[in-house]
């Protein structure tokens, strides 16, 4: 009986270690995926911000343009964005 309880205790210890390892590995994978997602979001927001800045700059130039040719060229560049 004592041998069976010892074997059962050993089995539960191994099982607990396996569960602990899987939880650690899944936590690491989740952390890595979260970091990757946040990095991509940051890059996307940075790109979007740059495009918005460029658009505002072109609109300001369009307002300040003096000749119709300048206005047409700036309007074309704005519409390309």
Image: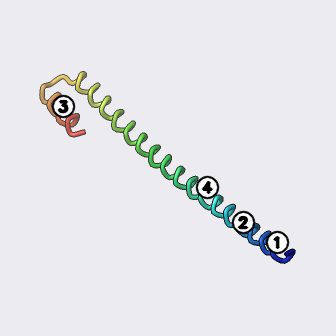
Q: Which circle's residue, 4 or 2, is located before the other in the chain?
A: 2
Q: Quadrant of the N terminus?
A: bottom right
Q: Could you give the CA–CA distance between mark 1 and mark 3, rounded to whole angstroms?
A: 83 Å
Residue with the mark numbered 3: 75
Rendered location of residue 69, percent (x, y): 13, 30
Q: Which residue is labeled 4 in the image?
A: 27
Q: Which residue is mark 1?
A: 5
Above or below, comparing residue 1 to residue 27 in the picture: below
Instruction: Give percent across and percent down for residue 37.
Output: 48, 49
Q: CA distance from mark 4 to mark 2?
A: 15 Å
Frontmost of labels 1 and 4 is: 1
Q: Secondary structure at mark 4?
A: helix
Q: Nearer the viewer, mark 2 or mark 3?
A: 2
Q: Quadrant of residue 61?
A: top left
Q: Are the residues tagged 2 and 3 within 8 Å (C-beta)?
A: no
Who's the residue at 14% across and 31% down the image?
A: 72
Where residue 73 appears, x then y in whole percent? 17, 34
Along the polypeptide, which appears first: circle 2 or circle 3? 2
Q: Quadrant of residue 7?
A: bottom right
């Amino acid at each position: 009986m004592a041998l069976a309880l010892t074997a059962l205790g050993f089995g539960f210890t191994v099982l607990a270690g396996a569960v602990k390892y899987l939880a650690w590995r899944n936590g690491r994978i989740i952390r890595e995926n979260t970091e990757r997602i946040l990095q991509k979001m940051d890059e996307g927001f940075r790109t979007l911000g740059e495009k918005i800045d460029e658009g505002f700059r072109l609109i300001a130039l369009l307002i300040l343009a003096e000749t119709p040719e300048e206005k047409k060229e700036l309007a074309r560049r704005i519409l390309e964005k």
